[in-house]
Amino acid sequence: MGGIQIIGWDPLLPALITLGGTLLVCRFFLQDLKLIRCGTLLAQSRGVPVQSVRLILFSLISLAVASSVSICGPIGFVGLFGPHMARMTGARGEGEVLFASTMIGGSMLTLCDVAARTLWAPSEIPVGIITSGVGALFFLWLLLRRS
């Protein structure tokens, strides 16, 4: 169920290098992403190689996710919760959504980790259980709100 109880920087260094490189390369594709978001036909008419951009970004994001999961295990709903909350708080552009998603997702994970360590002290439950519960309730609320 995942956890973030790593001690020391040694296991984190390869993941941070991978994540930093991925974010740096993805930054160069923001303009292409904006055009793809408006529609693939429009993006192609503006000269964006849509299939190539998708393949490159899919590969890079998969590498970033794999490096994160290799360190802390599967922690569900954080990657879905962050962007939804970012858009609900008013973030609009891709850069704003990326920054707000990172901050909101990190804050959610920190709060869930604190809850996982303190609710049933002295025993500790995996943080993935707490994030899955919070995420499931959040998406249930989203579904009920839209209907």
Image (cartoon, helix red, strand yellow):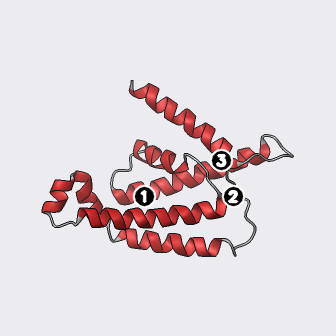
- Of callouts 3 and 1, the N-terminal one: 1
Instruction: Report the residue at 43% width, 27% height from top.
Output: 145
16 left or right of 117?
left
32 left or right of 116?
left
Q: CA distance from mark 3 to mark 2?
A: 10 Å
Pointer 3 local density, CA inside 10 Å: few below 14, some 14–19, many at least 20: many
Q: Say above or below: 80 vs 22.
A: above
Q: Position of residue 96 (x, y in %)?
A: 39, 57
Q: Say above or below: 83 vs 16.
A: above
Q: CA distance from mark 3 to mark 1?
A: 22 Å
Q: Tags 3 and 2 in contact by the CB under 8 Å rule?
A: no
Residue at the far left in the pictured view:
45
122 left or right of 14?
right
Instruction: Report the residue at 69% width, 48% height from top.
Output: 127
- Disc 2 residue type (three-letter): Ile
Instruction: Report the residue at 21% width, 66% height from top.
Output: 48
- Tell me the number on the disc at residue 98: 1
- Disc 3 residue type (three-letter): Gly
- Of callouts 3 and 2, the N-terminal one: 2
Pointer 1 local density, CA inside 10 Å: few below 14, some 14–19, many at least 20: some
Residue 31 in view of the camera: no
Q: 70 or 26, which lies in front? A: 70
Quadrant containing the C terminus is: top left
Instruction: Report the residue at 48% width, 47% height from top.
Output: 80
Q: CA distance from mark 2 to mark 1?
A: 22 Å
Reading the image, the residue beneath label 3 is 128
Q: Secondary structure at mark 2?
A: loop
Choose mark 3 or mark 1, whichever is in front: 3
- Tell me the number on the disc at residue 4: 2
